[in-house]
Image (tube, rainbow, N blue to C red):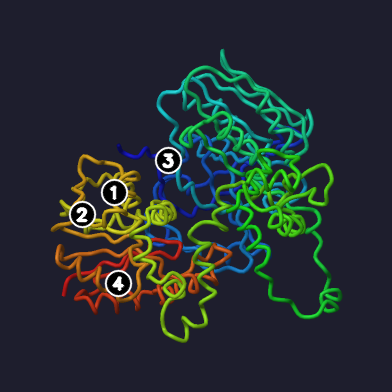
Amino acid sequence: MAAQRAYTTHPLVLRRVTVRRVEEVTPRMRRVVLGGEELAAFTRDGIDHPGFTAPGFDDHIKLILAADGDVRAALPAQLPHGIEWTPAEHRLTRDYTPRRVDHRAGELHLDFVVHGEGPAEAWSASAREGDELWFVGPKSSLRLPERLDWILLVGDETALPAIGRFLDERPLDAPAHVLVTVPDEAARQEPVLRDGDTITWVVAEPGDAAALDAAVRALPVPAGEGYVWAAAESRALLPVRRYLQRERKLPKDRLNITGYWHREEAAAAEAPDTADAAAQGPAEIPSPLPWLVARAALRLGVVDAVADAPGLSADALAARLGVSGAGIGVLLPLLAAYDVVVGADGGAGLRLGPAGEELLDDHEREEYTGHEAELLLALTHLAPAVRDGTSPWRLAAGATLHDTVTHDADRYAELVEECEQLVFLLTGLTADPLWADVGTCLLTGPGSASVVAALDDAGRRPRLRIAEESVPAEILRGHLTAPDRIDWTAGPADVAVAAKALAHRTDEEAVALLTRLAEWTGTAVLVEASRPDGLSPHAAEAALHAYTATGSPLRDSAALAALAGRSGWSVDRTIALGWGTEATVLRRA
């Protein structure tokens, strides 16, 4: 069965707009109305860009600000088809939902919560007519299921722009049930409701997880097929997600839950001044102990057990998990020290602390138990790997990463999911003239599903072949669209696209793959990250991650060209896709 696309992609364009007027919607919400020629189709530096489009009610654009006020220095580089986030020390970005897009008037409305803090709110407070604002996006729009009997829209005041736009534009002809938490009655708005709609207002402090969870649980369950969209403080949404998935049994394709903001704990807000920092002495290298303890708690089921049954004693927890009481006794004091659990001192029973609540989130959990966590553990072999000229993964696992994932469906599935974001970067590839005469395309690599989706979005319809081994092919089958034109056997093709196929291969394995592709086609395209993403806070670690996986640093254009040359290819050209990713077009020598 074909995978259901959950979103539609859009070209990524850097745009400049100016303030036309500022309106006070409520004492808690300020609206800035923006306009400018770059909301329509325009040309900059010889590159033509399409007009701004944001058809989805929860689309996000990324505002670009600067801590030092020099916004121009913080801007990303505009590519013909995409954005490259070059390093910028003072860049600040914030995501916002367009409240309204008025193409006739050439206006974009953005609503800002008035809370007295944050760079975006500060900008909106000082915004005056004529002030400029730069932004990128949206990169995609949510696709709602075609047939629904109801939709539930849940959020705090930061979700009001998206909820208001949904109710104004009605992308779905079904009753809408709305639940919004606000800090006081003054934050309430008057949305446009229809017969059959309901709206519930709950007064609660921003980020109050208990209040949001209780309010969602108190809602009646409508009959028929439904969909839940929720947006609020990220930690406050964790119990809501757990309730909807575990108790209401809603499938993942009927849920869209997004953390719009993250509350910083007050205890960590104060930084030491210069004198205090000097008195503390030199900075210490952080211990891996908290990470290892959190990983053990997740793998043993401690976090889930305490979430499902708060108030357990240590002995009851050990019995529930079927593990030794002595082992749990060793873990609990450390888990309490790291705020994973509280109540480990024999009080009213165990419950999750702030860190434990965050570990309920699937993305947070993957950092401790998923593929990236296994790569991190392989770094215990870093010194001998550097000495022997091999990859830490090979020393840790006794096999290369490629051999491992080829025979492990779960690991390969993780690689495929990691590549889902690739679809937002492939416009530059699908717009390239090389597709003009392509009738058949051979695909390989965990990014293959994203290539198919990007070809569909671009209106490209070549016949497709899959050049994967049996286990990866089965994993890709569940992610690929257009099954009617897919041949699940390798063979001759007009072009081959290797999408992130080299990122888990050693140099020798990469040469072997490229040599194999040369047997089937005269043109190949390598889609790989060739430099760190300048927007990522972990950019400095990219080379080490690559070395851990393959025994080679992050392969730049020269390194890819060298691998191509060893396997009988020459580089025809390189297409910059953005976010540090390139498409290298090869021709058979």
Q: Nearer the N terminus, badge 3 or badge 1?
A: 3
The answer for how far apart the CA atoms under marks 3 and 1 are is 14 Å
Q: Position of residue 358 (x, y in %)?
A: 65, 49
Q: Dot 1: within a 10 Å radius of its alpha carbon, few (fewer than 14), some, or many (20 or more) residues?
A: many
Q: What is the three-letter code of the residue carrying label 1? A: Leu
Name the foreground residue: 135 vs 376: 376
Q: Position of residue 414 (x, y in %)?
A: 43, 54
Image height of 188 relative to 97, above or below: above
Mark 2 secondary-structure assignment: strand
Q: What is the three-letter code of the residue carrying label 2? A: Cys
Q: Nearer the N terminus, badge 2 or badge 4?
A: 2
The answer for how far apart the CA atoms under marks 3 and 2 are is 24 Å
Q: Nearer the N terminus, badge 1 or badge 4?
A: 1
Image height of 31 relative to 125, above or below: above
**Residue behind mark 4:** 509
The answer to whether residue 103 shows anywhere in this view is yes
